[in-house]
Amino acid sequence: MEIPYTVDIRPDTGLNNVKLGIWLFLASEVMLFGGLFSSYVLLRVGAEAGTWPQGAEILSVPLATFNTIVLISSSVTMVMAWASLKLRDLSKYKLYMSATVALALVFLIVKGFEYADKFSHHLYPSESTFLGIYFLITGLHGLHIVGGVIVNSYFLLPGVKMWHTAPERFTNRVEAAGLYWHFVDLVWIFLFPVLYLL
Amino acid sequence: MDNVTTVGHAHADHEHEMPFWQRYVFSQDHKVIGIQYAITALLFLLFGFTLMMIMRWQLAYVGQPIPFIGGLFGDANAPGGIMLPEFYNQLGAMHGTIMVFLGVVPLVVGGFGNYVVPLQIGAPDMAFPRLNMASYWVYFVGGVVMLASFFAPGGAANSGWTSYVPLSVIATQGQTWWLVGMTCLITSSLLGAINFIVTIVQLRAPGLTWMRLPFFVWTQLVTAFLLLLAFPPLEAAAFLQLMDRLVGTSFFLPSGLVVSGQALEVSGGGSALLWQHLFWFLAHPEVYVLILPAMGIVAEILANNTRKPLWGYRAMVYSVIFLGFMSFIVWAHHMFLTGMGTYISAFFQTTTMIISIPSIIILSAFFISLYGGSIRFTTPMLFTLAFLPMFGIGGLTGLPLGLAVADIPLHDTLYVIGHFHYIVAPGTLFALFAGIYYWFPKATGRKMNDLLGRIHFWGTLVFMNGVFMPMMIQGLAGMNRRMYDGGEGYQHVQDVLHWNVVMSWSAWGLGLFQVFFIINFFLSMWKGEKTTNNPWAATTLEWQTPSPPPHGNFLSPPEVHRGPYEYSVPGAATDFTPQGQRP
C-alpha cells in the first residue's frame, strides 16, 4: 500500500503531504508561543506600576545579541544544506548540516551560561513574574532548539541513508526540518527584543 | 460480488503475515487505530458516567452511606460509605475531564474520524500512518495518567474540569497529574489534527471535489482546525500552571493571597483571570469539537434514511466553516461573571449571538431535509431523529446564557449544567450512538441487533430527559451548581429539592439501559446477522468496499463522479446512486 503524494506534488493543491503537514504544525506552534507572549503582555500590563523590571537590568544583552547572530547564521547554513541537496551535492550538505547543528549547540551552551549566572545570583523563576516568564519562554524555546538538534543530527547521520534510495523524499524531509528550524529562529527574533530590550 | 470478496480475502491473508502485536496493538492501519480509539473512549465514557452515578447518590440521599459499593472507596474518601466533600469534588472534576477529553473527543474524532474519513474520501489510509499510531498512544498515556491520579496523595484533581486558579494552584498533587495528563491529550489531538487536515486536503480520490465531500468530512476538517489552533494556548496555560505549582512562580497568584489564614509566600503579581482566558480560548472551540462531527454523523444518517439529498448542502458547508471561525472569538461569554467591562461583554455577547446563526442554519437544514422523505425508522435513524429536538433544546437554552444580563444570575446555577448537557449528552452522544449503529456493519461485517437497539434508544431517550430537564427547573429556581449537599442548605430551593431524587434515579436508569447497548455491541460482534457490503443502500464511498475493508481500503482506486447524497434521483435504476458510479 502506497500513500499518494508523500513525495509528488498533488496538482490541484500544489503541495505534498510533508510540506502541508509541517506548515500546519508550525501554525499550532504559533498559537503555543502566541499564548505565552499574550500571557506576557497581560501579566506585564497588569503588574503594579514600577514592579516590572527592564529586561536589560537583569539579563545580559551582549550574550543574547551574540546568540541572535548564532541562530541567524544557523538558519543560513540550514538553507545552504537544503540547497546543496537540490544541487545533488551530498558532501556540501553534510558540511552545512554539521555547521547548523554546531551553531545550535553553541546557542545552547551560551544559554546554559546565562541560566547558570542567574541561578548563581539567586535569580530563580519564583523570584518575580518577569523571571518566571523569562525562564518559561526561553526554556520552551530551548527545548525546541534541542528538538531541532535531534532532528538535524538524525538527518546528518543515520537518516542520510535515505539519500541513496529516495533522494527526493530525503530532500523534502530536510526542507521540512528547515522550515521548523527557521520557525524556531523566528521565535527567538521575537523573544529577544520582548524579554531583553523592552 | 463473489470475486470481490475473494480479493478481499487475498488481502486478509497478506495481513496474517504481520505478528499480532503489529496488526492489532501497534497498528498503523487507520481502521484498527479508529477502533482502538473508539473502544478506549467508550470505556472512558462508561467510567466517567460511573463517577457521576456515584455522585448522584450523595445528591439525592445527602450524607447517607452509599449502598453496595460504599466500602470500596476507603476511609480517605468515604468513611463508613459516606462520601466526603473532597471526594465529591474529585468525582466532579474528573467526570468533566474524562467525559470531554478522554471520552467524547477521542470517540468523535479519533474513533469515527479515523475510521470513516479515509474511507469516505477514497484514500488508502491517513496521510501519516505512524503519526496516527503515535497520536493514539499518547492519548492512551494521557488517559493512564488521569486514572493514576486517583491514587495520588489527596486523590485526583478536585478543582473542577476548568481548573480555575488560584484554587487549582494550591490544590493537592492530583492537579499536577491532571496538568501532565492534559499535556499528553493536547499533544495527541495536535498530531491527529495535522493528520486529518493533510489527509482531507491531499488524499481525496480523483473527482472528489470540495463540494462533493460528504458533510461528515467537512465537519471533521473544521474540527481538526479547531483542535490545531485552539489547543496550544491551553498547553501554554498548563505550562504556566505547572510552573506555579512546581517551581513556585506566581503567574496566576495575585499579590497578598491568603490561604487558610496564612499569607502565601510567593512573589505575587499574577493574574487569576489570565487562566480563564487561556482556558476558555481552548474550551469554547472545544464545544464545537464536540458538536460539529456529531452534526456530520447526523447528516450522513439523515440523508441515507430519508432517501433524499440533504436540503441546503452548500449552506451547511459555509455555515460550518463560519462556525469554525467564529468559535475563536466568543470565549469570554463564559466569563461574564468575572466583572468584565460593558464594552467587552457587549462584544462577546454580539459574537455569541452571531455564532448561533450558522448553528440554526444547520439545524433548520436537517429539519427541512425530513420534509417529504419516506423515512426508514432504523435504529441509527431513531437516535438521529432524537438528536434534532434534543440539540435544539440545548442550543436554545444557551441563548439566554450568551447575554450578559441573563447570564449573571443563571451562570452559577444548574441551568448551565442542564444547557450544556443537552448539547453534549442527548445531543452529541445520541449522534455517536447513531454512528455506532450505522457504521458497525462496515467495521465488523455484521449488523447490530435491532430489538436491543430500540430498547436502548427508548430507555436512553426517556432517562436522559429525566436527568437533565429537572436541572433547568432547579436552575431557574436559583439552585447553585457544584453543591455537595445537593442544595439542601439553601432556603430558597426547598421547593425544587425533590427533583434530586428523580434525577438520580433517572441517571441510574440511564446506566441500566446502557447494559442493552453493551450486550448488543459484543453479541453482534460475534453473533450478529451478517450483512452485505452496503446494508443501508448508501451512496458514499465507504460502502463501495468490502465489510470490513481490507488493508489499503479499496480493491481498486476509487473515482468519484457525483455528489454525496444522490438518493431517489428520477430515472435512476435504484433509489441511490453511489458516488463512484459512472454517469
Image (spheres, coloured by chain):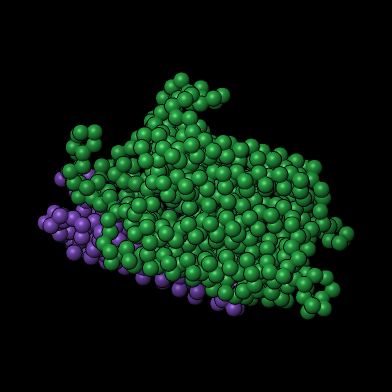
Most distant residue in the right direction: B2
Chain assigned purple: A
Task: Give left or right: position of B48 versus B538.
Answer: left
Can residue B550 be seen?
A: no
Q: Position of residue A173 (x, y in %)?
A: 51, 65
The colour assigned to chain B within the rendered structure: green
Please say if B52 is above or below B416: above
On the image, the x and y values in percent for residue B556 come to 76, 67
Q: Position of residue A9 (x, y in %)?
A: 58, 74
Q: Nearer the viewer, residue B488 or A103?
A: B488
Find residue B233 and report its horizontal and vertical position in percent.
38, 57
Name the quadrant of the N terminus of chain A: bottom right
Is B33 or B440 nearer to us in this picture? B440
Q: Residue, x 15% and y 45% (percent of image)?
A: A121
**Residue at image location 51% in from the left, 26% down from the top:** B66
Instruction: Tell me what residue is drawn at x 53 percent, y 67 percent.
Output: B360
Question: Hey, which residue is sitting farthest top in the picture?
Answer: B80
Residue B191 versus residue A56: which sits nearer the camera? Answer: B191
User: Which residue lies at the image location 36% right of the left edge and 34% below the top edge?
Assistant: B489
Seen in the picture, residue B135 relative to B229 is either above or below; the reply is above
